[in-house]
């Protein structure tokens, strides 16, 4: 699999929505010892701990808008499998430059 240097190396990354990403980043780092890897504007932050990672993203109320980023060999096959087993897909696989 081609390594994507723009995201942490973790195979599964929870993407958690918060109304205030900067505040959520401070709280997650203080409370759980996570480390800020990358901040993207005021709307997104990548946090790491050991070989794990979490992304905090701008969203409405806590508990809404959460998702998972999953690194796989064949995104289309993984998408089809998840869909066939009842997963709610927010957006289909997409290629980015």
Image: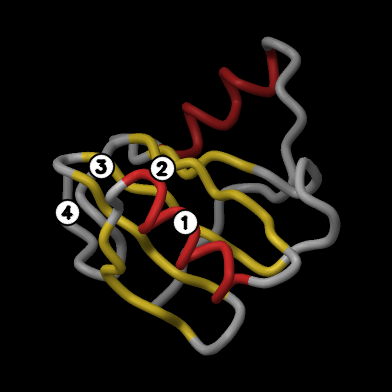
Dot 4 lies on which element?
Answer: loop
CA gap, disc 1 to disc 4? 21 Å
- Closer-to-camera residue (33/48): 33
Q: Which mark is residue 2?
A: 4
CA gap, disc 2 to disc 4? 17 Å
CA gap, disc 1 to disc 2? 7 Å
94 left or right of 37 in image: right
Q: Which residue carries the number 1 mark?
A: 55
- Provide residue 63's location: percent of width, then percent of height: 77, 41
- Provide residue 39's location: percent of width, then percent of height: 40, 79
44 left or right of 90 in image: left
* Residue that sits furthest to the right in the current view: 61
CA gap, disc 3 to disc 4? 13 Å
Mark 3 and mark 1 residues within 8 Å of each other at the beta carbon: no
For mark 4, does the 10 Å Cα neighbourhood hold few (<14), some (14 to 19), or many (20 or more) residues?
A: few
Up the image or down, 45 lies above or below 76; here it is below
Mark 1 vs 4, N-terminal side: 4
- Closer-to-camera residue (86/75): 86
Q: Which residue carries the number 2 mark?
A: 13
Q: Which mark is residue 10?
A: 3
Residue at figure coordinates x 25%, y 42% from the top left: 10
Mark 1 vs 2, N-terminal side: 2
Residue 11 lies in quadrant: top left
Residue at figure coordinates x 26%, y 40% from the top left: 52
CA gap, disc 3 to disc 2? 6 Å
Mark 1 and mark 2 residues within 8 Å of each other at the beta carbon: yes
Up the image or down, 70 lies above or below 45; here it is above
């Amino acid at each position: 699999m081609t390594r994507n240097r723009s995201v942490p190396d973790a195979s599964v990354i929870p993407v958690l929505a918060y109304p205030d990403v900067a505040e959520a980043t401070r709280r997650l780092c203080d409370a759980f010892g996570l480390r800020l890897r990358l901040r993207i504007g005021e709307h997104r932050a990548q946090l790491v701990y050991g070989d794990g990672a979490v992304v905090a993203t701008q969203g409405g109320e806590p508990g809404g808008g959460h998702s998972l980023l999953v690194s796989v060999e064949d995104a289309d096959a993984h998408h089809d499998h998840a869909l066939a087993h009842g997963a709610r897909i927010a957006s289909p696989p997409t290629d980015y430059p």
